[in-house]
Image (cartoon, rainbow, N blue to C red):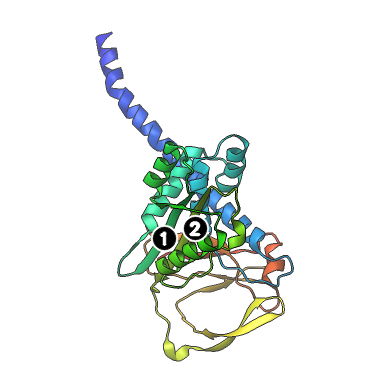
Amino acid sequence: MRIFLTYTIFLLPFLVSQFANFGAVCGDVLMEKAQKDFAINLLRAATDENGMKACVMSPISVGIALAMTLIGAGGQTEKQMMDVLAKGATKEDAIEYLSRQYNKMIGTNEKYELISADKLLIQKNFNPLPAFTETITSKFGPQLETINFNEARKAAERINEWVANKTNDKLHDLVSPVIFNVLTRLVLLNAIYFKGKWVNTFISEATTPATFYEAKNKERQVSNSVNPRIRGFHAEKVTNSLIERNLSITPSTAFLDEMLYDKCTENLCDALKKERQFFRYAISSI
């Protein structure tokens, strides 16, 4: 009996540890699939119905902001958010996964610069639960700041100025005064600035003007360059080219978004409505 108990004592921590690791891996697998679905659905929702509006966004940025909101959600609200953001995973898995992705990707080195502008704005004299603010700051580290949303114009100007400064003056007018009212108590901000180097640089001499089809019946001239090392594919029965573009970053800091390469024969909105006509725009090294 003593031998059996001794072995049980030694094996139990090992089994618990292995089970915990297995659970974490399963959670990550579910989250990776959920995030791909989230990115596609986000593009569908954001695309103008008539194809008259071009749309550029960062699904990971939206996901991080929603993850911060999820921390304080409960009941039916939590269920609906989980269905959109992390279907099949647990709330803990979702928060941990997005927290790791966030902390892994931010930073600067010789290959890329990524700045994440995060701020938790709280209405003056409003006090959220300490557990909520503590979890958000420990997982995502946003700055906390009190503000008077009743002065909507001043609040919007203050926020937009801060975002512009954090994103090297690339992002302007993130918020409008009309989104604030007397019931506004808390605003979560997330804006991402990214600048990276190509693994295979483009040849400046090969850069020429070309037509970019921005939306239905809307086009403009842009600088177009060719790099023979970047591979283009054409999927059978699909009018969109499958393109993989590689930036000089490691797979551990890779971002995966589902997007479209729009050809002049088919606008973005129409293509988004058709099954299996998405291509994967992967920012990763090979």
Q: Is residue 69 above or below residue 54?
A: above
Q: Quadrant of the N terminus?
A: top left
Task: Give whichever of 224, 15 is nearer the camera.
Answer: 224
**Amino acid type, mark 2:** Ser
Provide the residue designation for mark 2.
61
- Residue at image coords 25%, 16%: 6
Q: Earlier in the sequence, mark 1 or mark 2?
A: 2
Give percent across and percent down for residue 171.
Answer: 49, 70
Tag 1 near tag 2, CB within 8 Å: yes
In this rendered view, identify the residue nearer to me: 274 or 54.
54
Q: Which mark is residue 286?
A: none
266 or 48: nearer the eye?
A: 48
In the image, which disc is placed on residue 116? 1
Residue at 50%, 52% in the rendered image: 188
Provide residue 35's location: percent of width, then percent of height: 54, 51
Query: Relative to 24, is 15 above or below?
Result: above
Residue 271 position by quadrant: bottom right
List the single residue furthest toward the top: 1
Task: Give the distance between the C-alpha atoms of the residues marked 1 and 2, in whole angstroms.
Answer: 8 Å
Residue 128, percent from left and from top: 47, 40
10 Å neighbourhood of mark 2: few (<14), some, or many (≥20)? Answer: some
Type of residue at label 1? Ser
Could one spot residue 237 in this view of the protein? Answer: no
Q: Residue at x 31, y 26 (%)?
A: 13
Q: Quadrant of the C terminus?
A: bottom left
- Looking at the image, is 211 positioned above or below residue 171? below
At mark 1, the secondary structure is strand
Residue extending furthest toward the right = 50
In the rendered image, is residue 173 in sight? yes
Say which element carries label 2: helix
| Residue 190, x across and y down, in percent | 47, 57
